[in-house]
Structure formats: C-alpha cells, structure tokens
Amino acid sequence: KIVDTTSFLTIVSYHYVRPIGDSQYASIKGLEKTDFEGQMEYIMRHYNLVSMEHVVASIRGEEQLPQMALLLAFDDGFSDHYLHVFPYLVAHGIPAAFYPSVSPTVERKMLDVHKIHFILACETNKIALVDSLNEYIEHARESFDLEPIHVYEKDYKNPNRFDPGEVIYIKRMLQHVLPDVLRTKITDNMFGKFVTNDQGAFADELYLNEEQLKIMIAEGMHVGGHGVHHEWLNHCDKSHQESIVRDCRVFLDSIGASRQFMTFCYPYGAYNDDTKAIIARHGFDLAMTTEVGITDLTLHDNYMLPRLDTNDLPKSCEAEMVSWTRNLM
C-alpha cells in the first residue's frame, strides 16, 4: 500500500490501436479501437492524465504531479496513432507522448520488427513458421558458422507474459540473434511469402509521416526519440549508439518537437550505461524502458523509467479496479 502518491507516475504503453476485428490482419497483436476508448474511460475515471511536459517539470523540481498521475505513451509511429488515437485525445483534451523511429517515418521503409509482427499475424500455425525459419537457418549454417538448431531453441524458445515459446523464438532469432545480413534476408523472404511483396506500399499505410507528426505537435502532443531502425541499443557499440541518438535529435528538430522537453523511449526497452550517458549528453531529460512497474520519480533513475502495458489495465469504465490502480489509492 502506497501512502503519498505525488511522486508516483503510471506510464501506459501502446503499439497497434485499430479496428482489428474488421481488418485484413485480424490476428495482429494490438488493441481494438473500441477497447482503447473503453480503457480511456477507465483511466479518466480513476487517474489524472498528465502531459510529458508536466512530468519533466516535476523531475526538475519545478512542478508537482497530482495524485494518481498517468501518462500515455504510444510507440513505433504507426498511422493508427494519427487515425484512431489522436482524434480521440484531442476531442477529450488528453495529452500523450508519441515515439516514432526515424527510418520508417522519413524513408517510408518497413522495420524488421514490424515485418515479424505481420508474418506472425498472417500465419496462425506458429510451429510451421518455426519450421520455415529453421530451414533457412539450417541452409545458412555453414556459410555463417551458426550453432545447431537445438542450441538456439534451448536458449530462445521460452514463453514470456504475452507470447508462447514459438513466437518468442521467431522474434529473438529475427530481431538480434542471427547475423544482420542473414536475419534481414530471412525476414524479407518470410514477409514476401506470408504477407506481401510490396513493402513500400505496406510501409506507407503502416507508419505516420512527418506532416502528421507536425499536426500532432501543433495540437500539444509530445514526440520523442525511438531510434532510427528500432535497434537493440545494448547490442550496438558506443559510436553507433552516438550516431543513432544524434540522428534522433536531428529528426526531432526537423519536425518541430520541443527542445525544452526532450525524452527517449528505448526500442525493445534495451539499453546499457553507454546509452544512458549518450542520451543525457544530447539533452534528453528522461527515458522509458519496458520494465513493468509504476514510476517513482524520487526513486527511479530518470533514464530507466518503468511502464505498464495496455494489457495491464481494464478496457472498460465499469471494470473492477485492478491492483495497479488500487495500490496507489
């Protein structure tokens, strides 16, 4: 039980928010638009929604957060956020923070992480997907000096709180375990086989563009850094991380994001001490992880703030209060 909650902040993260059931990709792991609206009603009933500017000001000691403070954070720069989230937020006077990666926004190129999401959404038989992936790995084993399949499966085919082992295995192998060149080639082949060969058109439909972000900023929304190609920053050397963060700064300046309140959201929640030092040096005030929890601004490192996932809170105003809410009261 927490007594004084003025230093506590609930940050809730979102990714896909769309009318999923009626869409071509009904198996994508996202939030139904109607469930998003229901969750907003739950949040407005029990919390005080705050802006990122208010959060940064409280970290600086310039303002105090209200009791039951909650911040909304939308990752990955999907067009969903402009089409389905932004109008609702504006209509209800709700502030929020958005974290697009640079490459898809500017270059209109698919990120591998999202190719993987849609591969998984388009093939319901995950065992068949694993078999397909393992065929590619086996074929490339000698050329790339890879481990035997059973070693990879032992290390990476382990479920987490949202996904079964097969899904985690596919994600990890194609996100960072296999060598760069190989995993990009395999991901492209599987995306072409299971989703579409027209990556350009798919990217144009999937991601926000710079003009949309400028409109959102003009309406008071916060936009922060989220990498260039959605990299696992803890797997990048120091100079590469420096380049990524610098490119994020240039991008944020180019769309007119606030220089007074600058924030970062680690892709995959992945970072190391170098990352923290680099983003601090580039003027970012705070950074968010994927660690699950409530932020205590008097306790947490400003560059290691935990968050909840949308799945941790109810999707209806009438729902019974969950412990994440109740324990703050």
Image (spheres, helix red, strand yellow):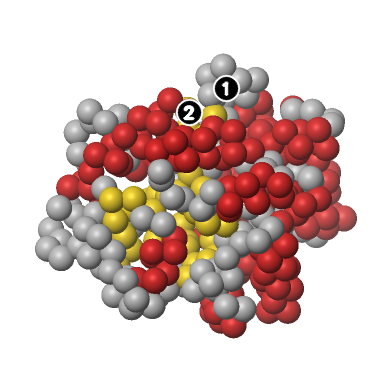
Residue 154 visible? The answer is no
Q: Quadrant of the N terminus?
A: bottom left
Residue farthest to the top, as pictured: 22
The quadrant holding residue 270 is bottom right
Residue placed under numbered mark 1 in the picture: 26
Residue farthest to the front, as pictured: 218
Residue 233: x %, y % from top left: 63, 67
| Residue beneath the point at 30% across and 41% down | 43
Question: Distance of mark 1 from mark 2, alpha carbons?
Answer: 13 Å
| Residue beneath the point at 75% across and 44% down | 110
Question: Residue 33: which numbered mark, if any?
Answer: 2
Residue 261 visible? The answer is yes
Q: Could you say whether the residue bearing mark 1 is in a helix, strand or loop? A: loop
Residue 81: x %, y % from top left: 56, 40
Residue 177: x %, y % from top left: 67, 56
Numbered disc total? 2
